[in-house]
Amino acid sequence: MFRIVAYSDALQEPWDRLARSAGTVFHTTAIRRILLESFGYRCCYHAVVDSDNRVRALIPLVRGRNLGLRKAGVSLPFVNYVDLCADGEEALLYAREMLPALRGYCGLDYIELRLKDQPAPGDGWQEQLRHFTFSLPLAGGEETVLALSSGSNRNHVRKVYRSGRFDVSFDPAHLDAFYRVYATRMKQLGSPAPDVRFFRRFLEWLPEEAHLLTVLDAATGSVAGGMLLLLSPGDETLYYPYGANLVAYNNYYLNNFMYWEAVRFGIRHGMKRLDLGRSQAGSGTYKYKEQWGARPEQLRYCTYDGTSSPSGLPDPERLRLFVELWKKTPRFITDPLGKRLISYVFP
């Protein structure tokens, strides 16, 4: 016998215990805190408990408004995917069955789930299948992992290290410089950027899991690129959810250096795989990640609003117009405006 209960502080310890044993770092309550503090979302997290009040499944869900001001419950914004977490099939099925009821209980216009290993929860859910994530195996050590790459990629990795152009740092003191690179690159790609405090909260609330990898120009010591990396011991995965580099360094194989340092970091920490993040099929980043020997895995973005044709996910054509407009608008407008708009975008 199961029942569903809303998250409270009393659930924090058993919630995190199940998240770390059967889920990922993204299921933890630290991510909840980061999202609520950074973007003003409301908590719609729920747990499935059994007759002994043991937490058996987790439904991480936050409530906000999208660009059309519809009330959305998303699991989870700013996260590429987060499957429902459960300690058994029965608890998982119960969690899936309760999702439509949660829409009404939380006062939502629609629910959006971002799934990888699980199918859509049932009838009435609309799937968007444009996105893939990439998983690179880390077993066998550095030479084994490098052998998975294409010949040209292996050559670029070796070439960038012979050049001595870059150094790597894991000093969190580089966060502000990394953020300037990140915000610049997001503007070039036509996307608003969150406030730097979003990234700072990862280092604050996940001190063991969150690590800032920055690439330094060896000649000047300035930050040329970087990644926020998240260790997830429960599924033995190193995640790369956020990162950017200055395009001026593209011809010097900065990305090859940065990705390889992430590989080495994951191996040192005993991770079995490196998740290289989300890309759309046919995009430049999709093809680049394939060169590393990483395996594309289909993501299922599913929406439910109680009708036969849910409409929560944004229209690609309208987004394309927004992207082009954002690229051309001056930064003195987009920088402050983006920090306000980003919570409505649900990236």
Image (cartoon, rainbow, N blue to C red):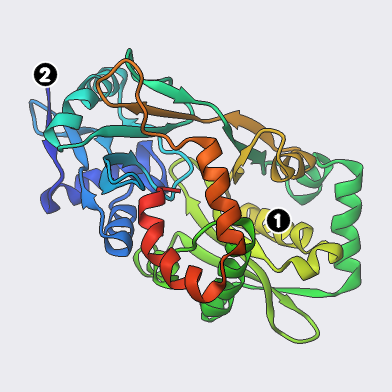
Q: CA distance from mark 2 to mark 1?
A: 47 Å
Mark carried by residue 259: 1
Q: Nearer the viewer, residue 160 or 321?
A: 321
Examine the rendered structure and indicate whether residue 18 appears above or below residue 265: above
On the image, the x and y values in percent for residue 206 come to 39, 62
Pick the quarter of the image with the N terminus. top left
Give left or right: position of 175 versus 96. right
Q: Residue furthest top?
A: 123
| Label 1 residue SS | helix
Name the residue located 44 percent from the left edge and 64 percent from the top edge: 338
Along the horizontal axis of the image, is 276 left or right of 220? left
Question: Badge 2: how crowded within 10 Å, few (<14), some, or many (20+)?
Answer: few
Dot 1, how many residues are within 10 Å of its Cα: few (below 14), some (14-19), or many (20+)?
many
The amino acid type, in three-letter code, at marker 1 is Tyr
Which numbered circle lies on residue 1? 2
Disc number for residue 249: none
- At label 2, the amino acid type is Met
Can residue 60 be seen in this snapshot? no
Q: Which one is nearer the viewer's eye here, 63 or 45? A: 63
The residue at 40%/27% (across/down) is 302
Residue 205 lies, with reference to residue 43, above or below; the image says below
